[in-house]
Amino acid sequence: MRRHHHHLDLLACLLVLAAAAASPAKPKPSSSSAVAPAIAVDFVRRSCRSTRYPRVCESTLVPCAPAVGRSPRRLARAALVVGADRARNCSAYIRAAGGAAGSSKAGKGAMKDCAELARDAEERLRQSAAEMERMGRAGTPRFAWSLGNVQTWASAAFTDTDTCLDSLAQARGKVDGDAVKRRVVAVAEATSNALALVNRLDPAPHRLR
């Protein structure tokens, strides 16, 4: 299970690398091209200490260090992409396992709800990652507007995972939800970490999940 997630997270980082390479060059000291690999890895690890699940944060985002450099914004975007990919995997797994939920109406309902919630979480996280590309310069109204959108959407994605877990708990005994729960928890942890890294971009006081 962990190995499968690691493979998906590595693919997510490759996508972040491709996006960074395709974006216009920005001659700033924090750009990934100006940062030695060891320094970039250290930046990611230190940033992960502010998250609720630092080990998960490191294992999923250290592979993205070459694309991140020392950019908090790129790191937050990479975390959102990782969360979105985990949500997509979770939704696909639940849809495939839905037929094995037994004949219980409650069991099938819980699986259907979770599949839809995981799909919604993926869409919100991808929307958030896309919005990160349009944030503009820090301190501008556009930046504040985009950051608020990302925080709202990422928080909603985290709520989706909570709702799914509640649905599984209510259907306990009517659906074998252990495998599904592990995948939903993986999405929740990645989303929580992404939200914490996004919140670090906000100069106003905030509460980390």
Image (cartoon, rainbow, N blue to C red):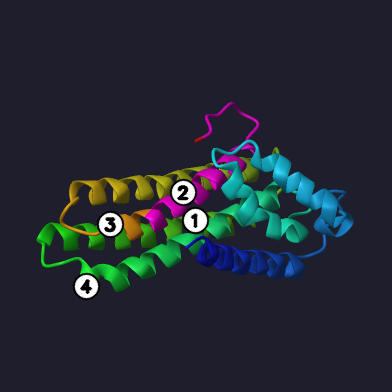
Q: Earlier in the sequence, mark 2 or mark 1?
A: 1
Compare marks 3 and 4 and give the one earlier in the sequence: 4
- Kindly identify which numbered label has been placed on residue 188: none
Type of the residue with mark 4:
Gly
Amino acid found under the numbered disc labelled 3:
Gly
Residue drawn 84% across and 49% down? 39
Looking at the rendered structure, the kind of residue marked 2 is: Trp
- Circle on res. 153: 2
Under mark 1, the amino acid is Leu
Mark found first going from the N terminus, 3 or 2: 2
Identify the residue shown where x is 18% and y is 63%.
108
How packed mark 4 is, by other alpha carbons closer than 10 Å (few <14, some 14-19, many 20 or more), is few
- Residue 99 is labelled as 4
Residue 197 locus on image (x, y percent)? 61, 43
Say what secondary structure mark 1 lies in.
Answer: helix
Q: Look at mark 1 in the image and give the residue it sits on.
A: 125
Q: Closer to the observer: label 4 or label 2?
A: 4
**Secondary structure found at label 2:** helix
State how many labels appear: 4
Q: Nearer the viewer, residue 146 or 113?
A: 113
**Between disc 4 and disc 2, whose residue precedes?**
4
Circle 3 is placed at which residue position?
Answer: 177
Label 3 or label 1, whichever lies nearer to me, is 3
- Contact, mark 3 vs mark 4 (Cβ under 8 Å): no
Q: Is residue 66 above or below residue 189?
A: below
Please state the extent of the stretch shown in magenta in the rendering.
182-208
Distance of label 4 from label 1 (alpha carbons): 27 Å
In the drawing, does residue 131 fall left or right of residue 14?
left
User: How far apart in space, not on screen, are marks 3 and 1 (Cα)?
Assistant: 24 Å
Q: Is residue 130 something one can see in this rendering?
A: yes
